[in-house]
């Protein structure tokens, strides 16, 4: 018998300034977790608009 168990769907967090709000129209990946974050956290993300400097981005519920 084949094991048909699948991995749970992960939650992907992207920069809140992505797409139309981004000067470069980027969709930067911030973090991927197996479950939804229980609270908001601040992550540091390298931003191509800011010469790849790390900028604080708030992600989570």
Image (cartoon, rainbow, N blue to C red):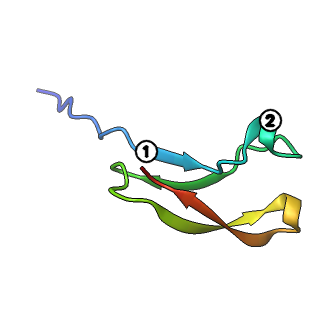
In the displayed structure image, the side of residue 30 where residue 54 appears, left or right? right
Q: Report which residue position mark 2 lands on.
A: 20
Q: Which residue is drawn at 17% across and 32% down?
A: 3
Q: Is mark 1 on a helix, strand or loop?
A: strand
Q: In the rendering, which numbered label is found on residue 36? A: none
In the displayed structure image, the side of residue 39 where residue 17 appears, left or right? right
Neighbour tally class for label 2: few under 14, some 14-19, many 20 plus, Cα within 10 Å: few
Q: Which residue is drawn at 69% across and 50% down?
A: 28
Q: Which of marks 2 and 1 is in front?
A: 2
In the displayed structure image, the side of residue 12 where residue 55 appears, left or right? right
Please provide percent x and percent y for residue 31: 53, 56
Please provide percent x and percent y for residue 41: 47, 65
In the displayed structure image, the side of residue 1 where residue 33 appears, left or right? right
Residues at discs 2 and 1 in contact (Cβ within 8 Å)? no
- 29 in relation to 50, above or below: above
Q: Residue at x 42, y 49 (%)?
A: 61
Q: Residue at x 86, y 65 (%)?
A: 50
Which of pointers 2 and 1 lies earlier in the amino acid sequence?
Answer: 1
Q: Nearer the viewer, residue 42 or 4?
A: 42
Q: What element carries label 2?
A: helix
Quadrant of residue 38 in the image? bottom left
Q: In the rendering, which numbered label is found on residue 11? A: 1
Q: How far apart are marks 2 and 1 (CA)?
A: 22 Å
Which quadrant is the N terminus positioned in?
top left
Please provide percent x and percent y for residue 6: 27, 35
């Amino acid at each position: 018998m084949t094991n048909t168990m699948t991995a749970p769907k992960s939650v992907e967090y992207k920069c809140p300034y992505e797409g139309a709000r981004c000067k470069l129209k980027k969709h930067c990946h911030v973090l991927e977790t197996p479950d939804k974050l229980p609270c908001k956290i601040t992550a540091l993300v390298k931003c191509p608009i800011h010469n790849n400097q790390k900028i604080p981005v708030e992600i989570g519920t």
